[in-house]
Image (cartoon, rainbow, N blue to C red):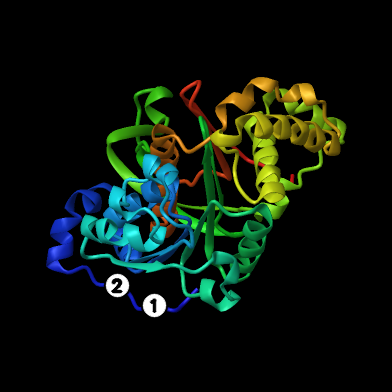
Amino acid sequence: MIEKEDPIISEEEAAQYDRQIRLWGLDAQKRLRGSRVLLAGVGGLGAELAKNLILAGVKGLTLLDHELVSEESCRAQFLVPVSAKGQNRAQASLERAQNLNPMVEVHADPDRVEDKPDDFFLQFDAVCLTGCSRDLMVRIDQLCSQHNIKVFCGDVYGYYGYMFCNLGREHNYVEEKPKVVKPSSDSSDGPEAKKAKIDPTETTMVKKTASFCTLKEALEVEWSSEKAKASLKRTPVDYFLLHVLLKFRTDKGRDPDPESCADDSQLLRQIRDDVLEAMGLSSDLLSDDFISYCFSEMSPVCAVVGGVLGQEVVKALSQRDAPHRNFFFFDGRKGNGVVDYFGPN
């Protein structure tokens, strides 16, 4: 992470971000204003995340994507004009992204994220990875963890979406809590009057710390122990679905494609069996019906997951409010999401 001076909020910025400053305070907005973010992958989810970060008021956002604009990407990606088919996706998204907030420095980089040297990632305060392979995410996460750079990963597969975050072994933040009013020592109105009470009209800022593990640790949970197996009933099946979809991406170099639905469905079923068997788990844990709902990026799912992902990046950079630790899974069929921790202990 690069060293940076204490950012100064100008009068123009104070007016632009007035509602946000009232919500989370000037210090939090200053931290945001001093932060540079890398976003790798400007698909449907990436566009939602870019919009949220630009509107929140980070200092700079770099859009990194080597993919070309296709008919498929236009369906869920609102930053690229329809006339941009065949152009680089990051560069085609730049104009609309910049117009969202001229105060944010938005850059487009058409290179492959796999080709970037380690030093490239060290110039950012947060790195967000979408559409990346498991091995690449693990490598970048481990690199950034060593340099106190916050890492976020996310993807949308049809009706399903997820987010992972690693904010380091020690992430400090403040949380606003109702103020507890202590009774006066000379109170003589009985035991009830001597109890501490919460004053809903006043709040105080409480300093807290949260610890995170690496993505590698989060994905390599051991399920053979009796304690782990006993916890399966309360474990979201989305975690195992993520393993299947990441394995598909590793094997095929892409995500499930509607144009090869029959072949991809058969492969997904086989990968499901192989992945769960390798974990020592039954294939019945993840029923076949998931296969019909994990093709393409769906705009509403991108909006939900992108909103949560953007919120978590903002909270982490501003060091304001408790972060999600460490996975968020969203199921568009049910219309609900869940936060759960996977990793050591």
What residue appears at the point 26 percent right and 47 percent down from the top-left corner? 23
Element type at mark 2: loop
Q: Position of residue 159 (x, y in %)?
A: 51, 30
Would residue 147 appear left or right of 230 to someone viewing this image?
left
The circle on residue 201 is none
Tags 2 and 1 in contact by the CB under 8 Å rule? yes
Looking at the picture, does residue 264 appear above or below residue 286? below
The front one of 249 and 186 is 249
Looking at the picture, does residue 249 appear above or below residue 277? below
Residue type beneath disc 2 = Pro
What residue appears at the point 32 percent right and 55 percent down from the top-left corner? 84
Would residue 196 appear left or right of 172 to someone viewing this image?
left
Q: Position of residue 137 (x, y in %)?
A: 62, 57
The circle on residue 7 is 2
Element type at mark 1: loop
Looking at the picture, does residue 290 appear above or below residue 95? above
Q: Position of residue 111 (x, y in %)?
A: 49, 69
Q: Which residue is mark 1?
A: 4
Would residue 195 appear left or right of 116 to someone viewing this image?
left
Dot 1 crowding, Cα within 10 Å, few <14, some 14–19, many 20+:
few
Q: CA distance from mark 2 to mark 1?
A: 8 Å
- Numbered marks: total: 2
Q: Position of residue 203 (x, y in %)?
A: 31, 43
Would residue 46 appear left or right of 151 to someone viewing this image?
left
What residue appears at the point 63 percent right and 70 percent down from the top-left corner? 146
Residue type beneath disc 1 = Lys
Dot 2 crowding, Cα within 10 Å, few <14, some 14–19, many 20+:
some
